[in-house]
Amino acid sequence: MKNFKNIALSILLITAMLAGLSGCDSGGGSNIIPAQGRLRIATTTSLYDTGLWNALEDRFEEEEGIRLDILYAGTGIALEYGRRGDVDAVAVHAKATEEQFIADGYGIERIPFAYNYFVIVGPAGDPAGIADLSPEEAFKKLYDTQTTFISRGDASGTHTKEKAIWKAAGYDYEEVTSAGSWYVEAGKGMGPTLQMASEMDGYTLSDMGTFLAYKGETGLVTVVDEGSILLNVYSFIVIDPDNVEGADAEKAQILADFLVSDEIQQFIKDYGTADYGDSLFIPCAGNEPTS
Amino acid sequence: MGELWQGIIRALELIVTFDPEVMAITFRSLGISTSACLIATLICLPLGSLIHFTNFKGKNLLVSLIQTFYSLPTVLVGLLVFILFSRAGPFGNLNLMFTPALMIIGQSLLVMPLMLGLIISALVSLDKTVADTAFSLGASRFQAGLLSLKEARYAVITSVIMGFGRAISEVGLAMMVGGNIRGFTRILTTAISLETSKGDIELSLALGFILLLISLAINVILSQLQRVEKSAAR
Amino acid sequence: MLHVEATHLVKKAGEAVLLKGVSLRINKGESFLLIGPTGAGKTTLLRLLGLLNSSFKGELSIFGVDVISNQGKQLEIRRKMAFVQQKPVAFSCSVFDNVAYPLKWRKIPREEITDRVGEVLDLVGMKEYSNRNAKTLSGGETQRVAIARALVTRPEILLLDEPTANLDPNSAGRIEEVLTKVVQEHKTTLIMSTHDLVQAQRLAEVVGVMIDGKLVQTGTPQEVFHAPQNSQIARFIGFKLAEQDFNRIV
């Protein structure tokens, strides 16, 4: 009887382990330690929350036969992973930071593959009355009226853009963060930040794609959507294997080529139109859009 | 309250229909934590025995240190493992970052202090006469240690269960060194974290409910085993 | 041939001095019984001689080998001895497995184990209990299993700490029979402590009296009981014998 119990327990354990470990790669690839052969990229939350990457991942894996691992992280962390060589490429949207990244030797080049616009969104009815103002003027009015504004507060591309607008409006960012409790630093991804704005009846800066994806849930509306400063370009950067050990530039380049291919560019353009009535992204095939 | 109820219903739906992604996440969680626990047990049984039966200077200090690490924050251990195994770190060329293998290594490191401390406790509370008797009948240190572990088996099994509990419920380490990659390193706890931050509370509740079921199941099975053992001793 | 030679053993436990310079010699095949009041240090001395305690001062040779300078040989020597505790503890398995353990540890083959265990269980009259869970035994039964466990290895030196103290007269008598038989047949050296002076008279070739950490007199039972060396010993023996007589009458 005792032996039976021991055997039963061992079988239970081994089954649990095998089941678990074989379930590890649910795409049918090799098991627990296959860092070889996998392409790892880090992407911003705003791209991820729209679901675009999930859709692209399946297609890419099928067409190219390369297992793609996507890490969901803010631009700041994504670039750090890139510097450390823990990912092979990054897809972010903070031009100035990206250019510095490349100048420092971590990335090979910027490959813009899609863009949209940032929008300032807020509660329906626009209580602060900033509609039709320019982004810079709108921010000024929010500051003066001390209207609740939710910032990403996480060194993401969106956050970088927000800071740029404050600067263009003539403010020192330090002033803004200490201006009062109306200015909220969420420290979250784009989707969650939008929800927070919705719950607090406040305004926030968002990329169009994520906003549309979350529009139904949040009930927020676009308030300010014009202004050249609102251009939001997503770029793909292959990590430079000459300066960062272990980066798989070869596979990363395949993904880069995939992204700017005609087929995928069309896919990106069509993405979301069925569900949200509008394109979430505009393809730009490697070329920097002007406005 | 309605949200909670919705979560439970959705959980049952997902379980009953064997939703593939949920199943994959569940089995992955189990696999990773079980493996981590197994590794930790294989190391802590002999190590605990060795520490207990050897007298050396600073032994009390060592045991105190081990106990201090019982509830080391998981994000801290996660950070440490991340730094060590990042490509830029000392073990970078093993290329383990963001893989289940690293999660297993990390979780075993996480539960080892707890398991080690509890196993040593179990041996300490064992009647000293047991080891003494063994020695007096010609057992070597190793043989006496093995016997002591067998005699203290309830407490030892409990240590293992507690280690497993800590492993399967942690999220900090899994997130940092696993990366929560869909279809590869996403486990119950990290998935709950993601879905909540994306606002899908219902799905989070559903996954949470499954996690709870697992914990309950394990505890029931093992306390049954303990009960059987106890009555056999009567 | 000398099996045990101890010179000036001193053992401390913190502030207390448990053994204050004990010296003795025990020959091969000899039955040496230790008597003395509680707390005199009998158990301490036995444990030391059984190599269960290695922190002491003084010299100790077993089978002619100095145990302090030959640390590596201790396991080997211990394997030729066996010790039965005052309150023996049974392992959580069957009676058979309990008794088989010392043989398993010495890597004796399976069939031999079965034979030897059966043999020794028979000797102590516990054969029918073979498959019983040892934890369910009474005090006396446990004692017999413990002795069987010690005897199964055919030790050259057998140490027992008050083996019949907790037994009813019947079981006690049984144990004495076993010990006598074993000593006769195998010429085992017996080192035992007891509270029962009459038992000491029956079993001992040499009696050692321990009082307050010192071995104050050794000699044949005749010598010790009829010619105690000092009043302290005399008092102890007198008192003890009176107590035993009293218990017998009552």
Image (cartoon, rainbow, N blue to C red):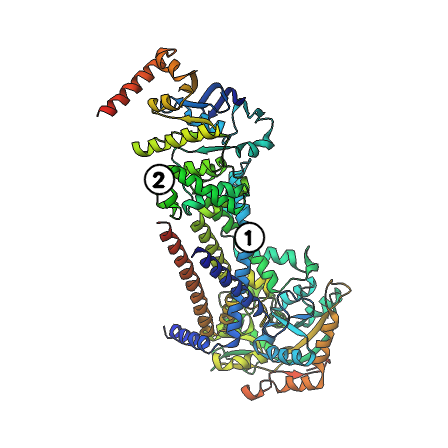
Nearest the viewer among A245 and A104 is: A245
Looking at the picture, how far across and down is residue B132, in whole percent? 47, 36
**Kind of residue sitting beneath label 2:** Glu
Nearest the viewer among A26 and C83 is: C83
Nearest the viewer among A233 and A244 is: A244
**Kind of residue sitting beneath label 1:** Leu
Nearest the viewer among C215 and B152 is: C215
| Residue with the mark numbered 1 | B42
Looking at the picture, how far across and down is residue B137, in whole percent? 49, 37
Q: Is residue B48 left or right of residue C92?
A: right
As drawn, C95 above or below B96: above
As drawn, C42 above or below A144: above
Q: Quick check: can you spot residue B75?
A: no
| Residue with the mark numbered 2 | C141
As drawn, the residue found furthest toward the front would be: C185
The residue that appears at 60% across and 80% down in the rendered structure is A55
Marks 1 and 2 close (CB-CB < 8 Å):
no
Report the Cα–Cα distance between label 1 and label 2.
37 Å
Residue B107's label in the rendered image is none
As drawn, B121 above or below B14: above
Marks 1, 2: nearer the viewer: 2
Chain under numbered label 2: C
- Local crowd at mark 2 within 10 Å, few (<14), some, or many (≥20)? some
Looking at the picture, how far across and down is residue B119, in whole percent? 48, 48
Quarter assignment of residue C36? top left
Under tag 2, what secondary structure? helix
